[in-house]
Image (tube, grey):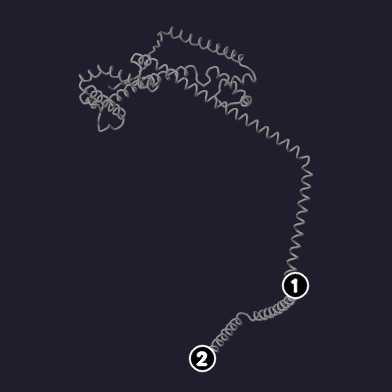
Amino acid sequence: MTSLWAVNQSGSGTLRCPGGKNEERMSTNSYKARNIQMSVMSERTDCVFLSSLGKGDNLHQQVLSAFPLCQMTEEDLTQNPLFCKLLASLSQHVDRTGLTQHLRRDLEKAERELHSQRLSWLREECVDRVLREIVQENRFSSHTAEDRFLSTLEQCLMVSQCVNLVDISEHHSGILGLTAERVKRQMPPEQDIAQMKQRLPSELLQHLKRKAVTILTYYQPQWENESEGLRSVKLSKLPELLDGEQKKAKSLTERNRENATSLQRQTHAYLSELVKCMKVLQCLVLDLRLKAQKDLDRKKIEYFEAKCEIGLQKIRAEMLEVQLDTYTRDKIAAHKKITEKLKAELNTSEMDKQAVESKLASFQIYGRDFEALAEEYSRLRQEIATKSWALKEFST
């Protein structure tokens, strides 16, 4: 049940070279004459082409229209005139996509071959899936075990799938060392395959008819109770109806896309006009306000200055009131006496500080030996004080 397809293309051409010196000389002369003729024709073609080309903006427009995929502007072509002429000459040999006629024919031929191969693969894939659906639907029915047709079909499909997997992995290590020939040995007997092939078209037709009826009843539920003949007539018209619905859906989709594009364009235009109106209104407001803005600003400044001055006066009045409530005459006199006493103590402390600093300066003259004696003296005094405290404690 495997189906393989291949596309083989072959072409042959022969080129004969005559023998003999005279023929070689004639061929050489004819080759030179052909070259001269080709050069003359090319010169004439260039002259005709240069005369047919436009000048200035017309030439630029021709180049831009000939190469729409290139991101160029008229300014680029103006700055590079030689490049512009080169593109203009190339536009006579290539199409809008940049392909020559030969490459375009090859591309179209390859696309046709690819389309035919895809169509062939799609047909085979559809038939394979329909056959698998037949096996899947009848797998759990009561007479499946006794029906040799379904068992043969299922076995053929399974072997076909295994052969495809083996063919895919033949460039790598095989699956469990299997080969396509070894898998094909698991095919049913030839007699069963022949009987299955003889019955297969009718089963396939019935299954496809059931699927078509299912699609028809889903598409139009009211046609489910129709007669068999009327249903067959409507089934024959079902592809046209589905094509019509598909075209209608595509047209509606395209219309919605166009409406969305138009709505977006209108929205953009509306917003741009709205921005322009806002700018005009803003300019009008500024023009009207600038006339009285100077006087208004001056009056505002005077108002805020007066308000600040009043606030400062209030703060000063509050500070004076707080001072009057806090400091009475008796308190002020007491503060003055305290201040005088503190100043006198401060002066006395500064005088003592100066006397001590002068003594320290005189002590520093004696050097480090005197420092050692002073430390020893302070240590002895501390020990004397400690022992006097201890005798006092013992005596009490």
List x then y, in percent, for residue 133: 30, 25
Along the line of sight, which residue is nearer the eye, 40 or 327?
327
For the N terminus, the image quarter is top left
Are there few (<14), some (14-19), or many (20+) residues within 10 Å of tag 2? Answer: few
Q: Nearer the viewer, residue 152 or 108?
A: 152
As drawn, 78 above or below 45: below
- The amino acid type of the residue labelled 1 equals Thr
- Which quadrant holds residue 313? bottom right
Give the CA separation, mark 1 to mark 2: 57 Å
- Mark 2 residue element: helix
Please state which amino acid type lies under the numbered disc 2.
Phe
User: Which of the two discs, 1 and 2, labels the residue nearer the N terminus?
Assistant: 1
The residue positioned 54% from the left and 86% from the top of the image is 386
x and y percentages locating residue 383 in the rendered image: 55, 86
Determine which of the numbered discs, if any, sits on residue 328 in the image: 1
Say left or right for 256 vs 116: right
Image-quadrant location for residue 146: top left
